């Protein structure tokens, strides 16, 4: 049976189907129009995420039924235009939930004058088929020895939910962060880009350094700079330390020289040194594209040890595809570069064999000054996803991976381009 009363948190993640049962996507948020008076907000529609990760807007009047586990539309034809908020609209989960409010309900005297957090919104369908936000679920701060109690009150009994008050800084992000758990950094970055600036900054501040570093690396250059500018200088340096050196160098290269140097000075010297070396190269050269931390081994390393190194979950698949063998020291710039070993070769050898005996010495290494076009031809010629970079004295400086090459080959706005692959260019 179709529901006429639902809670926003229950809608999040539900499958959206067309009238013939065809899958369209999943609900990620609800768009409502919050007014400055105490009138109940009207629901405008749903934010639906397509299989391509694009988020679109579906008007609420297109919804024919909300049932356990699924929402059905009256049409399978939807606009593929990326969702953008209009003036006066707010996102229930991204903006309203986690707000700090006060409840003026005579039946709940314990909440009088106490700050509580919004944890959910109740929606109700009217006789005219419109949907309104009628109820607000709130939860107070934990008190010593007591569990926090959830209360559901009428919208009109809650103060603090005008557009002006919701837009004030310092809003909690607990519920919002729960949506990002288990998601890939690239997907979190895309969702972060679609949040209003205020919420984007609040989420960034709340993420730990490692998670934020992973997410920042997936943003366009200008948005990386903007986000970093909203962090305290010490925090910004900590995030740069947690980033891959090549990504940190790319980001610092977008900043004024004095600002970049100030951040480098705040970083741990062991983390800033490889970034400084990368900044010496053109960003569109092998030296500017490379990471100084590929898998580097000595000739006496066993195959078993080499395989254990490439199993590191922090390695990208491209960097894990090849190990590089050098004379000590193994920190870049290393001792003399001897050769490389592909992971396929490691898988074919007995575990006790040494990598020094199975080297590929025929693969010509890259020079740091080699331009991007030449690096691209190198990968295409040798069918590689990773390649070594050495200096004139044959010291290994790092490795270029194909994902870094693609990042520089694609247009700057590639993240914003329409995903047509699954819909035949429709």
Image (tube, rainbow, N blue to C red):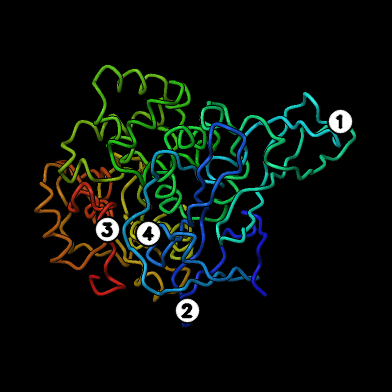
* Image location (x, y in percent) of residue 423: 29, 73
Q: Residues within 10 Å of mark 2 (few under 14, many from 20)?
A: some
Q: Which residue matches tag 4?
A: 54
Q: Which residue matches tag 3?
A: 386
Cβ–Cβ below 8 Å for labels 2 and 4? no
The alpha-carbon separation of the residues under discs 2 and 1 comes to 47 Å
**Residue 230 appears in which quarter of the rendering?**
top left
Q: Is residue 363 left or right of residue 153?
A: left
- Residue 260, compared with residue 315, is above or below; it is above
The alpha-carbon separation of the residues under discs 3 and 1 comes to 65 Å
Residue at 44% over, 42% down: 195
Local secondary structure at mark 3: strand
Q: Which residue matches tag 2?
A: 19
Q: Which residue matches tag 1?
A: 109
* Image location (x, y in percent) of residue 252: 29, 30
Local secondary structure at mark 4: loop
The alpha-carbon separation of the residues under discs 4 and 3 comes to 30 Å
Q: Is residue 81 left or right of residue 138?
A: left
Q: Which mark is residue 344?
A: none
Cβ–Cβ below 8 Å for labels 3 and 1? no
* Image location (x, y in percent) of residue 320: 38, 59
Local secondary structure at mark 2: loop
Q: Earlier in the sequence, mark 3 or mark 1?
A: 1
Q: Residues within 10 Å of mark 4 (few under 14, many from 20)?
A: some
Task: Residue lying at the far right in this picture: please name it.
Answer: 145
Q: Earlier in the sequence, mark 2 or mark 3?
A: 2
* Image location (x, y in percent) of residue 367: 14, 46
């Amino acid at each position: 049976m179709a529901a006429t009363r639902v809670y926003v948190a229950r809608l999040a993640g539900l499958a959206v189907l067309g009238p013939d049962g065809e899958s369209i996507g999943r609900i990620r948020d609800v768009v409502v129009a919050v007014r400055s008076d105490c009138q109940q907000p009207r629901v405008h529609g749903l934010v639906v995420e397509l299989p391509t990760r694009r988020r679109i807007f579906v008007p609420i009047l297109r919804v024919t039924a909300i049932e356990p586990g699924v929402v059905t539309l009256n049409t399978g034809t939807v606009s593929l235009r990326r969702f953008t908020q209009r003036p006066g609209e707010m996102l229930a989960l991204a903006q309203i939930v986690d707000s700090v409010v006060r409840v003026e309900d005579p039946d709940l005297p314990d909440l009088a004058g106490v700050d509580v957090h919004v944890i959910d919104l109740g929606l109700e369908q009217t006789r005219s088929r419109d949907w309104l936000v009628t109820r607000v679920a709130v939860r107070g701060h934990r008190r010593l020895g007591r569990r926090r109690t959830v209360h559901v009150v009428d919208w009109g009994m809650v103060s603090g939910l005008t557009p002006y008050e919701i837009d004030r800084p310092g809003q909690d992000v607990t519920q919002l962060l729960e949506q990002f758990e288990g998601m890939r950094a690239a997907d979190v970055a895309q969702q972060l880009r679609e949040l209003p600036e205020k919420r984007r900054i609040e989420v960034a501040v709340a993420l730990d350094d490692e998670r934020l570093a992973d997410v920042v690396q997936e943003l366009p250059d200008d948005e990386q700079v903007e986000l970093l500018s909203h962090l305290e200088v010490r925090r910004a340096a900590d995030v740069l330390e947690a980033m891959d050196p090549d990504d940190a160098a790319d980001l610092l290269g977008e900043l004024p020289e004095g600002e970049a140097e100030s951040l480098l000075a705040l970083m741990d010297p062991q983390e800033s040194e490889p970034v400084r070396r990368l900044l010496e190269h053109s960003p569109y050269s092998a030296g500017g594209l490379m990471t100084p931390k590929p898998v580097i081994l000595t000739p006496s390393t066993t195959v078993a040890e080499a395989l254990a190194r490439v199993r590191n979950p922090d390695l990208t698949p491209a960097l894990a595809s090849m190990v590089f063998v050098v004379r000590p020291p193994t920190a870049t710039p290393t001792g003399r570069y001897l050769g490389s070993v592909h992971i396929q070769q490691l898988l074919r050898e007995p575990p006790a064999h040494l990598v020094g005996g199975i080297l590929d010495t025929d693969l010509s290494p890259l020079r740091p000054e080699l331009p991007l076009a030449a690096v691209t031809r190198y990968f295409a010629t040798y069918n590689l996803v990773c390649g070594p970079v050495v200096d004139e004295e044959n010291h290994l400086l790092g490795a270029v991976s194909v994902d870094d090459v693609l990042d520089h080959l694609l247009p700057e706005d590639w993240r914003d381009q329409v995903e047509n692959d699954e819909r035949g260019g429709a």
